[in-house]
Image: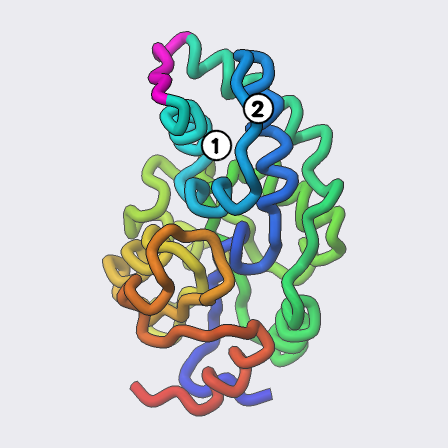
Amino acid sequence: MSTGPFSCILFDLDGTLVDTAPDLTGALNHVLALNKLAPVSVDHVRDIVGLGARVTIERGFFHYGRTLTDDALDEALEQFLAHYSANICDTSVLYSGVEESVKGFRDAGLKLGVCTNKTEHLSVSLLEQLGLAHCFDTICGSDTVPNRKPHPDHIHAALARAGGDAAASIMIGDSQADVDSAKAAGLPVIAMSYGYTAVPAHALGADVVLDAFSDIPNVLANWKR
């Protein structure tokens, strides 16, 4: 497999490799129910995730005009994480083409990393249950580093842990945080159009926008600097 000028690929997790929205929705609705609020839809959750569980919860309550105190948000986060940890892979699935492409990249000798605003232990747990964790040289979560996406330090840390060279690396994600962090770190970036963002993928500022994960190998093989 030719991957053009690239020897390392970093991937976002939620909305890029895995459709986690149904299980995230279940966890958020669990917390909302504890606060006597109606459930939100999966489509709504797809628009508000991407910056970590705490922000997702804040946005979930804001949907109902509620702003939580820091203490109340801490309690809601504990409730969310407890529910999500117990149900992290009930309905989450790899997107079409992910397993074949990632294993192909691995077999071709590329360094592979996950750079996600999900916490590291939850990211590892999810990918282990989906049978893909062993393919990655690092799984770098929001709590792995002092500054998470969209800060470029998250990208730099994931590259260092994966053993990648920034000059020969690319980021693949689905959100504004993915694009902004990659650009700030000096990496080209591909945005997947099926992911989790309230902003249309073509408006994120990525170098390339793709509809199918299986298109990535061909795009990388023909990439022009």
> Where residue 48 sits in the image (x, y, percent)?
42, 41
Q: Nearer the viewer, residue 163 or 132?
A: 132
Q: Residue at 53%, 12% (x, y): give it.
A: 35
Q: Residue at 33%, 89% (x, y): give it.
A: 224
- Report the label total: 2
Q: Residue at 50%, 21% (x, y): give it.
A: 77
Label 2 SS: helix
Vertical placement of 15 versus 32: above or below? below
* Quarter that holds the N terminus: bottom right
Label 1 SS: helix
Query: How is this picture coloured?
Result: rainbow
CB-based contact (under 8 Å), mark 1 and mark 2? yes
Vertical placement of 4 versus 136: above or below? below
Marks 1 and 2 sit apart, C-alpha to C-alpha, by 8 Å
Q: Amino acid at mark 1?
A: Ala
Vertical placement of 221 versus 188: above or below? below
Q: Residue at 28%, 64% (x, y): give it.
A: 203
> Residue beneath label 1, please?
53
* Quarter that holds the C terminus: bottom left
10 Å crowding of disc 1: few (<14), some (14-19), many (20+): many
> Residue beneath label 2, please?
80
Q: Nearer the viewer, residue 76 or 117?
A: 76
Q: Nearer the viewer, residue 170 or 158?
A: 170
The majority secondary structure of the magenta stretch comes to: loop
Which residues, given as a range, are shown in magenta? 65-71
